[in-house]
Image (cartoon, rainbow, N blue to C red):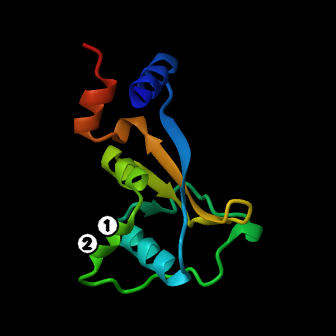
Amino acid sequence: MLWEGIAAYTLEHGYRNLIGCASVHMKSLKELNEIYSLLLWKQVITSRFGIQPLPTHRIEGLQWYEIDGQERDIMRRLPPLMKGYQWLGAEIGGDPAYDRIFDTVDFLIVLETSKVTRRYKKHFLDRS
């Protein structure tokens, strides 16, 4: 029901973009770099929005790793919400930021309504 409400509100007001945040608890920088590398490999992270964390929230040691053959294992470790955003067709706007208050890594989620995957567009956005 939540997504149906968001979809209805988006249509009613003619919004083209939805933004949000996916917060993830990471056990180590290695685990973060594996997930970051997977998202880069899948081309989910984009720099086209020109968004980057503030210098105070940048993550020291964030880097791309070679993940050949580990994609499935790393994908299993992604939180369900992040997988759901990918299935919707959302992108991640730039590098993640570190939230010291909640001790989380935050990914900026950008969903262009025109890029919602056909399956979810039919389910959430079509008004029949």
Query: Looking at the rendering, in which quadrant would you find the C terminus?
Result: top left
How far from the left and from the top, in percent, is residue 83? 36, 54
How far from the left and from the top, in percent, is residue 17? 50, 37
Name the amino acid type tagged 2.
Answer: Arg
Q: Is residue 95 left or right of residue 12?
A: right
Please identify the quarter of the rendering in which residue 42 is found. bottom left
**Residue drawn 55% across and 65% down?**
25
Q: Nearer the viewer, residue 120 or 102?
A: 102
Q: Is residue 115 above or below residue 69?
A: above
How far from the left and from the top, in percent, is residue 39? 40, 67
Q: Is residue 11 above or below residue 110?
A: above
Look at the numbered discs 2 and 1 and tell me whether their residues touch, using CB distance below 8 Å. Answer: yes
According to the picture, the residue beneath numbered tag 2 turns out to be 72
**Residue drawn 74% across and 61% down?**
101
**Residue drawn 68% across and 71% down?**
58
How far from the left and from the top, in percent, is residue 108? 56, 54
Residue with the most extreme right position: 56
The 10 Å Cα crowd at callout 2, few under 14, some 14 to 19, many 20 or more, is few
Query: Looking at the rendering, in which quadrant would you find the N terminus?
Result: top left
Label 2 residue SS: helix
Please identify the quarter of the rendering in which residue 72 is found. bottom left
Q: Is residue 1 above or below residue 76?
A: above
**Residue drawn 37% across and 72% down?**
38
According to the picture, the residue beneath numbered tag 1 turns out to be 76
Q: Is residue 19 left or right of residue 52?
A: left
Q: Nearer the viewer, residue 27 or 67?
A: 27
Name the amino acid type tagged 1.
Answer: Arg
The 10 Å Cα crowd at callout 1, few under 14, some 14 to 19, many 20 or more, is few
Q: Which mark is residue 121?
A: none
Q: Kindly report the distance in space between the C-alpha atoms of the residues bearing marks 2 and 1.
A: 6 Å
